[in-house]
Image (cartoon, rainbow, N blue to C red):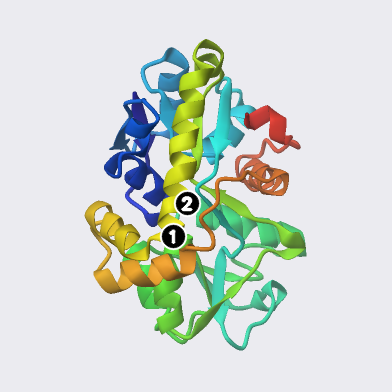
Amino acid sequence: MLLVLRAPSMTHLPFYAAEEKGFFSQQGVEVRCLHSHDDPQRVVQLMIEGQVAFYATIVAAVEAALHGWGELRALCSTMLSRYPWAARTEIQTLAELKGRKVMVGGGRSYNELLWPCRYYGWQPEKDIEVVHGELSDRVKAFLDPSFAAVFGRPQYLFWLKKGGFHLLPYPENRGWAEAGLATSLRLIKENRDVVQKVVNAIVLATEYLKQNRDQAVEVAMRNVPYLSREAAEGNYDVFRDWYSYDISEAAIAHQAEVFGMAKGRYRAVKLDEVAD
């Protein structure tokens, strides 16, 4: 069975470990992980058609519900992030970013910027100066005193600490379920036992990673090529307590709100609509 992952990332570490350390095999299932940059809607369609069994995502399950792409269900998370922004130490709340310069990427991080703009009634580009950058640009931004904050995935936490930044949490105890495992409702109905075994393997791999630092770093070094050993170790030390297979209703609600605002099709999404 094919499990599609997005770009290499330590968020995907439980999937790499499940394949490399034999957790899939121990459960009696054969799963091959493959990176793909295909559009999420295209991957969802392949899952609906039965050509792809699993997708390392929770976001796509939320988007499928919002946009009517097809019957998709998230099965477990791999990481729960409560800190989407990093700011200079003198900035203690998200509200203090008004009038400051921040850097974002072109995808999720920009969508996550639109959410606080709505939350506080700001206008992007008017009430907050926005600069777009790639991974290397955002790493450099941590060393540029003109930037007040950097919006990005948890993978930047190692570099932000070097730059003297600290994490700003979501207000209202919100969170973002990173990666995760999803499949089609069709596969759940047709072969629920096999789906459960794949979930079991991911849960076991997650627990293994949390207990075995050296092995986790080695798995990361083999699968996330842009990380130095220092970066892999630094990221792991931050992420270890974030690796989690639970999917919270609050995280699903937040993702629906962020993507709904970005795409102009927001509606409240309940956990049982997108998760099994």
Residue 252: image location, x then y, percent? 66, 43
Residue 202: image location, x then y, percent? 45, 40
For the residue pair 185 and 119, the one nearer the viewer reads as 185
Q: Is residue 225 above or below residue 245?
A: below
In the structure shown, which secondary structural element does the residue marked by tag 1 occupy? Answer: helix
Residue where numbered disc 1 is placed: 211
Q: Identify which residue is drawn at 49% across, 39% down.
A: 57
Q: Identify which residue is drawn at 40% across, 34% down.
A: 39
Circles 2 and 1: CB atoms closer than 8 Å: yes
For the residue pair 147 and 173, the one nearer the viewer reads as 173
Q: Quadrant of the N terminus?
A: top left
Residue where numbered disc 2 is placed: 207
For the residue pair 97 and 211, the one nearer the viewer reads as 211
In the structure shown, which secondary structural element does the residue marked by tag 2 occupy? Answer: helix
Residue 148 in view here: no
Q: What distance separates the C-alpha of mark 2 from that of mark 1?
A: 6 Å
Q: Identify which residue is drawn at 36% across, 33% down.
A: 26
Residue 105's quadrant in the figure?
Answer: bottom left
Tell me the amino acid under the disc marked 2.
Answer: Glu
